[in-house]
Image (cartoon, helix red, strand yellow):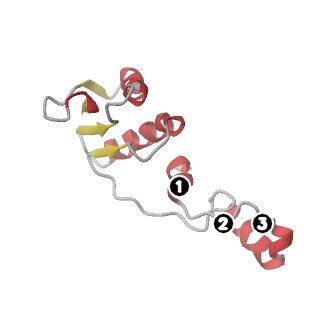
Amino acid sequence: MAYRFLQRLFGSRRDDDLSSRALGAEAAAESELDLEDGLEPGVDEAVALEITDTLDLHTFPPRDVADLVREWLDLAYDEGFRELRIIHGKGKGVQRRIVRSILERDPRVVSFGDPGDSSSWGATRVLLE
């Protein structure tokens, strides 16, 4: 159901170069089980992540940021967090713009802005309803 993006990012993957034919019937059957279990093909198992009030985007490429932030907001909200911190870094401001664009459109977001601490504009503080 939900959180497939996080599963895709953090699930352990098989080598993409190997086909199920090369792996044999056992691997093909295992791949079929992945589909039945709701996992993406090639994901061995879901990885449990601890959801906290802080998301550090430094290790993620900008192309993944939008989906990641949306899903993390859902999880953080469901966990009861109402004050969040998203660390996007200073750089050229690409990730900062992506993050704030998502926050502007999310109806649960009461306010967001610079955190007012030493991270200055390298992070965004978010208040949820």
**Residue visible at 49% across and 35% down in the picture:** 62
Amino acid type assigned to the residue bearing label 2 in the image: Arg
Q: Quadrant of the C terminus?
A: top left
Q: Would residue 74 appear left or right of 27 to someone viewing this image?
A: left
Q: Would residue 23 appear left or right of 103 to someone viewing this image?
A: right
**Residue visible at 14% across and 28% down in the picture:** 116
Residue in the foreground of this view, choosing between 89 and 12: 89
Which residue is labeled 1 in the image?
Answer: 7
Residue 12: percent from the left, percent from the top? 56, 64
Q: Are marks 2 and 3 in contact (CB under 8 Å)?
A: yes
Name which of mark 3 and mark 1 comes first in the sequence: 1
Q: Would residue 114 appear left or right of 62 to someone viewing this image?
A: left
The disc placed on residue 18 is 3
Amino acid type assigned to the residue bearing label 3 in the image: Leu
Q: CA distance from mark 2 to mark 3?
A: 8 Å
SS state under label 2: loop
Residue 25: percent from the left, percent from the top? 83, 77
Name which of mark 2 and mark 1 comes first in the sequence: 1
Residue in the foreground of this view, choosing between 46 and 64: 64
The disc placed on residue 14 is 2
The disc placed on residue 76 is none
Residue 3: percent from the left, percent from the top? 50, 48
Q: Quadrant of residue 81?
A: top left
